[in-house]
Image: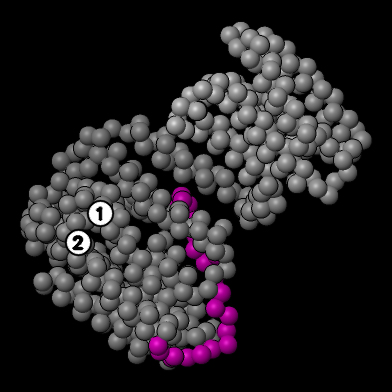
Amino acid sequence: MNSEILQDIPPDLINFLLVVVFSLLIGLEQRRHHINEATETLFGTDRTFTLLGIAGFILYIISPQNLTPFIIGAIIFGGLLSVFYFQKIKIQQKFGMTSLVTALITYSLAPLVYTQPKWMVLLIVVSILIISEIKETLLNFSKKFDNDEFITLAKFLVLAGVILPLLPNEPISAVLNFSPYKFWLAIVVVSSISYVSYLLRKFVFPDTGILLTGILGGLYSSTATTVILARKSKENVAGNRIIAAIFLAITMMYLRIFILAAFFNIEVATRLIPYFAVLILVSTLIAVYFSVLKKTIIGTGSEVVAASSHTNPLEFKTSVLFGGLFILFAVVTGYVVGHYGEHGAKNLAFVVGVTDIDPFIINLFQGKWNLSDSVISLAVLNAITSNNVLKMIYAITLSNKALRKEIFVSFMVLIVAGIIAVIV
């Protein structure tokens, strides 16, 4: 019954009502946005914008084929807007033209309603309403940007959208058993994860507390975060929360490595799920124990960690270091696997754990080393366990002396859990 009624309604009537409603919504938003301004200083609000949408509708349906009336109307209307804008500059000394651009879009609603899907028109209207309302939010957000922040974003877009598609996907040589495409893809994927963490850390959660620092820092670099937090413990900060944050960073390390595995080698990622689930559970329980149950040291120091504690992951030296380690581990892994087989790969993982493990692990995920998925999984677990030993040494060496025993015991629990996972 309802569908039959809708079928009897002329399409032009439906489109007219949509134009009127959308124009009225835009006009109401303009009135609310300029509610404290004198009416005579405005181009228009609810009635003006609604009439503007109706005028665009009338001029469009008169001749939708050649659009001559609509174009003439646009020229006349554009001229009136130009006069208003220059008078606004002359009298009010204001150069903003958001309302004028919004008026032009409102005039164009009719051809949009007729030629585009309704969801597209609705999306445009919603975008106008949101963008018009968040002026202060955007202003405050832009103040957080450094001078070179957009250069950083441009670097990332060039890395991912320009350079990557242009690189060949053929192996460089028998010795360097990876292609330029895979090499650059590794840089892009790792940089993406770190860059998201960096943006959250800087713009969404600046000057965060200890626990959130551990979570976001773990996505960036759990080792670097451990060093930062261990040093923070000497500032008379609650020691239990420092330890909890360190193990939250380690928890995020497992998640980061799993994301890399899922991206490059889903079979290995699937095999790692039960082991990572146990290790994540252990590290999370340790974090919960120290953040909720255990009260080690209640200090008076600030628990705020400045956003500047982490450097930009797209800095040139960071990319060069990662690229250099990636190539180095490709050569070393190829040599070790070629001469010592699977046992060599598993033992090499322990040695690599004292460095940045991401380049080595991605090499395992990407490379054609004639290694089974189980051996790659074991090598990943070995590298993580070795890296946890390194973090334990950093944490004990750099932290408040009162925390060292608990740090040692907590890390040993996690390290033993990692060894058991390897044995199993």
User: In which quadrant of the rendered image does the C terminus lie?
Assistant: bottom left
Secondary structure state at the residue bearing disc 1? helix
Relative to 320, 151 lies left or right? right
- Which residue lies under the disc numbered 2? 272
Q: Position of residue 154 (x, y in %)?
A: 51, 41
Gap between marks 2 and 1 measured at Cα: 9 Å
User: In which quadrant of the rendered image does the N terminus lie?
Assistant: top left
Type of secondary structure dominating the magenta stretch:
loop
Q: Position of residue 418 (x, y in %)?
A: 21, 73
Q: Disc 1 marks which amino acid?
A: Ala
Q: Position of residue 213 (x, y in %)?
A: 48, 70
User: Which disc, if any, is residue 44?
Assistant: none
Q: Is 305 placed above or below 14 here?
A: below
Badge 2 density bin: few <14, some 14–19, many ≥20, Cα 10 Å = many
| Bounds of the magenta segment | 293-317
Secondary structure state at the residue bearing disc 2? helix
Whether residues under marks 2 and 1 lie with C-beta atoms below 8 angstroms apart, the answer is yes
Question: Quadrant location of residue 63?
Answer: top right
**Residue name at image x 33 percent, y 59 percent:** 256
Chain-order first, disc 2 or disc 1 = 1
Q: Is 209 placed above or below 11 here?
A: below
Relative to 17, 376 lies left or right? left
